Image (cartoon, rainbow, N blue to C red):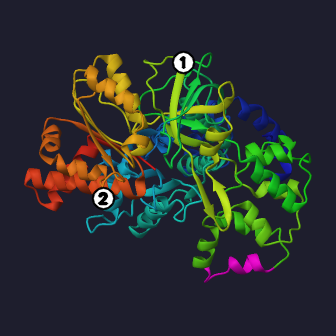
Amino acid sequence: MQLQVTNSPFNENQAELLNQLLPTLTPSQQVWLSGYLSALSVQGNQGSSVQAVSAAPAVVVESATAASQQASREVTVLFGSQTGNCQRLAVSLSRKLEEQGFKVTVSAMNSFKPNGLKKTENLLLLVSTHGEGEPPDNARAFHEFLYSKRAPQLPGLRFSVLALGDTSYEFFCQTGKDFDQKLEELGAQRLSPRVDCDLDYDEPVAEWFGQVISSLNGAQNTAGIANAAVQAAESAESLESGFSRNHPFHAEVLENLNLNGRGSDRETRHLELSLAGSNITFEPGDSLGVYPENHPQLVEEIIAAMGWDANERVPLNKKGAEGTLQEALLRHYEITVLTKPLLEQAATLNSAPALKDLLASGREQELKEYIQGRDLLDLMQDYGPWNAPASIFVTILRKLPARLYSIASSYNANPDEVHFTVRAVRYESHGRERYGVCSVHCAERVQPGATLPVYIQNNPNFKLPADSSVPVIMIGPGTGVAPFRSFLEEREEQGAEGPSWLFYGDRHFVTDFLYQTDWQRMLKDGVLSRLDVAFSRDTEEKVYVQHRILEQSKELYRWLQEGAHIYVCGDEKHMAHDVHSALLTVIQEEGGLSAEAAAAYLETLQQEQRYQRDVY
């Protein structure tokens, strides 16, 4: 960026010299110069020129020391992450801070001793929100501490919060908001305002990080540094393959099978994709990001309802790419989910007062009820007329996000392939048939030979123990069993000697026993040591996996005492809570512990990464 004389206190000659010098400086030279000028200011040498560098050696030494002191300020970066996004960002952003001369400590929130906050000067928090406004597993203890009576006053702390979330959820970025508010209440000062990020978070993350760097060291040109940090996180995802969330690989579909038997009221697809030529690898516990297409019928109905031309050229993204309206609605924009931010923007394109009335203060519950189970077609039909052409309307829509699925195969067992499991979602709402975007795309419109845009999302918080002799307990009803197919395939390749125990549940044994032949073979071969199943609709009284856990209470507790790792995957809203409660009961009763001691026992397992969850 060129310095403009009209916008600066420098004369033309000074501006020319600065424009020649500044673009050539490295980040470390920028930090040094910032410290040098600060030292001159403190000493009252505002009139000194840059020539003072060679004319006054003593000042140079003192200034360099000041710069060094400034650059060595300690920054603590804490992350709370369920799927790994905040962790990847925290690590890559910390590296950029270190390049700026800061001494950085990076830690998961559950590995940080909260009493250390009193000694912390600069704190950066990166945290996602899980479920209904809840902290991710590795942020729960830190969250509870800050909201407890033990939390200290923190007048000497400077902080900033980056919150990741999803605007389609009611409690968008709630955990980040909680941390931001509580630290302020405890007397801490903000380095920069909290930034709340939706699913497409690259730009707001770069903006937040640029503001943080500016506050920490006064750097004037932070945009490049911030963007480089976000790109570093992206490259960490892609490893050596060159493919990532923003640059997916188009994988050929090799198999697409229905895992449910004839007569089932469910349709669960097992897809096998080729990764040949991509250099993509993954580990058990990682997820596959899949970019789907919206249902063509819904796209056609939206275009017809608005009287638009399907071939009109419209923006496909914020970077200037264009395509047809049909392509935009099919592959680039989300059209099946309504959010409050979307309705607020839509109200600016609407001349009728009804939509603005719905958004008015005091009608929050009515708004929540309207949003639930409706899509863009409903909004267009319910609140016309609209005053914007298609080229303007699409710009208020959110980017169509990828769907994440637990990988159901081991790369070592199936080189150059990746398998995943998806249950087709179909339901009726407000008088119309509705579809799960990705699940029905995979079930109805993806055949062998077709391609799917995919990428790997590494999940460092859902990993097999490094020592394959360690016992593992896996709890995964329904499609939650998918990653455990990956786990057991991997352990088979390793020749693992440690025992393994799988709890699986679904509705009916005959029609809904996903991967039944795999489990039977693994039991026969000794890869799987134990299998407990629960089929809730086969008995008069519904039986779920948590009931099987309680039935095997003594044996399960013995495994825990012998060092077993527990893994839970599947529904967060009900199953994960029920399983958690069952585990607490087992620990309390078999260990002879109080409820508080049992909770502490399970918390310790989480801190030691012996209790890991991939729940959604």
At x 54% / y 25%, what residue is drawn?
239
User: Is residue 606 among the parts visible in the rendering?
Assistant: yes
Q: Is residue 219 above or below residue 468?
A: below
The question of residue 432 being in magenta is answered with no
Q: Is residue 555 above or below residue 119?
A: above
Which residue of the protein is positioned furthest toward the front in this rendering? 263
Residue 209 at x, y percent in the picture: 58, 47
Residue 158 at x, y percent in the picture: 45, 57
Q: From the viewer's perspective, is 331 left or right of 253?
A: right
Q: Is residue 432 above or below residue 215?
A: below
Name the residue type under label 2. Glu
Which residue is the site of mark 2?
540
Image marks 1 and 2: residues in contact by CB distance under 8 Å: no
* Res 51 label: none
At x 68% / y 24%, what residue is drawn?
449
Decide which of 405, 534 is in the foreground and name it.
Answer: 534
Q: Secondary structure at mark 1?
A: loop
Which residue of the protein is positioned furthest toward the left in this rendering? 592
The segment highlighted magenta reads 353-363
Q: From the viewer's perspective, is 397 left or right of 603?
A: right
| On-image quarter of the N terminus | top right
Q: From the viewer's perspective, is 270 left or right of 278?
A: left
Residue 601 at x, y percent in the picture: 18, 50
Which residue is the site of mark 1?
416
- Quadrant housing residue 412: top left
Tally the numbered discs. Answer: 2
